[in-house]
Amino acid sequence: MPLGRLVALTGQRLGRHWHQAVTAHTQLSGTALAALTALAEHDGLTHRDVARHCWVRPATLTPVVDALAADGLLSRKRDLSDRRAVRLCITAAGRQALREALEGVGARFRAIAPPTTPEEEAVIRAYLLTILDGLDAVEATEAREGSSDVCG
């Protein structure tokens, strides 16, 4: 099997198991978990930036953010330097919910994937991040080309 197909198939199947594990171990959706993860890593992102980290459109993220805010897992704060911008901030309860969800999901992942050494994980992580960067570049080019055709 060609490497590209192997990576795609693995990603597709792991994604299915990931979403099953998320729903089995938490009340969070996969998108909610991704949003909390993005905020845990980069607290204070804008709605649009969180959507980008979650690989969804901002409109798709709106009900997710509304639910997370209603549950006290994140808060919205006006940007002091740009009052038009709203920053999303993970709360202590959000960090706890994320930690619990990732523990459950991580256990399922460890049951599927063989253990890796830190060095192996670094190589795998770098390779997969390179693929994601390549996908970002292709999608950005397609978006630019598509938008110029529409407005042309």
Image (tube, rainbow, N blue to C red):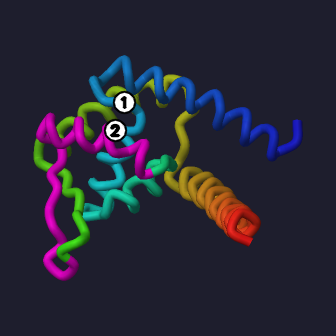
Residue 70 belongs to magenta span: yes
Q: Is residue 75 visible?
A: yes
Give SS at disc 1: loop
Please tell me how crowded label 1 is: few (under 14), some (14-19), or many (20+) other residues with Cα within 10 Å.
some
Please tell me how crowded label 2 is: few (under 14), some (14-19), or many (20+) other residues with Cα within 10 Å.
many
Depicted 15 relative to depicted 20: above or below: below
| Label 2 to label 1: alpha-carbon separation | 5 Å
Q: Residue at x 14, y 77 (%)?
A: 80
Q: Quadrant of residue 114?
A: top right
- Residue 1: x and y in percent read 88, 36
Give the amino acid type for the residue marked by disc 1 in the picture.
Answer: Ser
Q: Is residue 123 visible?
A: no
- In the image, taking residue 18 as reference, residue 151 lies left or right, namely right
- Residue 136: x and y in percent read 63, 62
Residue nearest the viewer, comparing 6 with 85: 85
Give the number of the disc on residue 29: 1
Q: Residue at x 26, y 39 (%)?
A: 98
Is mark 2 in CB contact (under 8 Å) with mark 1? yes
Give the number of the disc on residue 32: 2
Judged from this view, the residue extending furthest toward the right is 1
Q: Residue at x 30, y 63 (%)?
A: 45
Tell me the magenta residue range: 58-82
Q: Quadrant of residue 39?
A: bottom left
